[in-house]
Image (tube, rainbow, N blue to C red):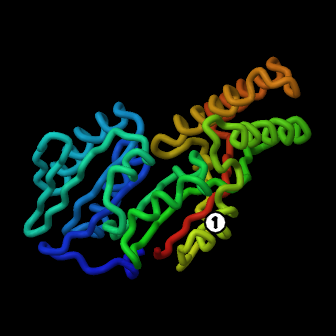
Amino acid sequence: MVAALPRAAADRPLRVIETGAGIGTMVERLLDGGLLTFANYDAVDLQPEALEAARPRLHGWAAAHGWTAVADGDTARLSRGDRQVNVHFHASDIEAFAASQPTGTADLLLAHAFLDLIDTPRSLPRLMRLLRPGGVFYFTLNFDGVTAFLPQADPAFEGRLMTAYHQTMDERVPRSSGRFTGRHLFDELPRMGATILDAGASDWWVRPVEGSYPGDEAYFLHFLVETVRRAVGGRPDLATSDVDSWAARRHGQIEAGDLIYMAHQWDFVGTW
């Protein structure tokens, strides 16, 4: 991604658009990695409460990392030395945002753990047109049909449970690209005129280390178990009592530091 981007300068800042920006962790990672020197960064998310959390979080991050951050309406103006990055927060549906913007002006389009939530054949071409000719896209954590919790006490039930969970992704309303978003992008991106420069698996692999989980991984696992339980609850092919027992067992394994979780995903980088 970095190699494909043009060199930024004070009189030629990069224009970056992030879809599904959430609480702003991607812009923090790019700043921390020294990848943003001069940039106008549009952080777009449908949920205003996520962006409300992003603003103070970004200011706190800046203070801790030697940047100066100044609030200017819905913009955070960050500077360090001669570097200048302006982060503009947009609480908007991404398609509505895309329709309000001039086409062909963005240097970089980002989507992190987002494209499997939208109908990519319909919506993604509208987003891609925001890129200038030769502009770069970086699409990360695109789910691709594999979820596993280990160890399995009842593989047959676990198989039916995961099948039902994945079906809920295919049945989302409004329609999304579903459980196989990752592999579909290999065909869909070239079909809409994009060039894939590289792709690679970006699997989640969460496991205990010496009987406990580092950081917030235990919280993350509890959240995932509840996500599965709620998603499949009430389906006629799975008894609610069986699903609840599965969830209780998995929560217990997390507390004991015994649960392993895996999910298969793809990352893509390319040009328009």
Q: Position of residue 263 (x, y in %)?
A: 66, 52
Where is mark 1, residue-wise?
188
Q: Quadrant of residue 229?
A: top right
Q: In which quarter of the image is residue 27?
A: bottom left
| Secondary element at image label 1 | helix
Residue, far right = 156
Q: Position of residue 185 (x, y in %)?
A: 63, 64
In this rendering, position of residue 124 left or right of residue 106:
right
Question: Which of 9 and 215 lies nearest the eye of the viewer?
Answer: 9
Q: Where is residue 91 in the image (x, y as percent from the top left)?
A: 34, 39
Q: With respect to residue 32, does 19 lie above or below?
A: above
- Classed neighbour count for the residue bearing mark 1: other residues with Cα under 10 Å, few (<14), some (14–19), many (≥20): some
For the image, the number of numbered tags is 1
Q: With respect to residue 218, does 200 lie above or below?
A: below
* Residue appearing at x 74%, y 23% in the figure: 233
Q: Which amino acid type is marked by label 1?
A: Glu
Question: Which of 258 and 58 lies nearest the eye of the viewer?
Answer: 58
Q: Where is residue 111 in the image (x, y as percent from the top left)?
A: 47, 56
* Residue appearing at x 12%, y 59% in the figure: 79
Question: Which of 157 and 129 lies nearest the eye of the viewer?
Answer: 129
Question: Which of 123 and 171 lies nearest the eye of the viewer?
Answer: 123
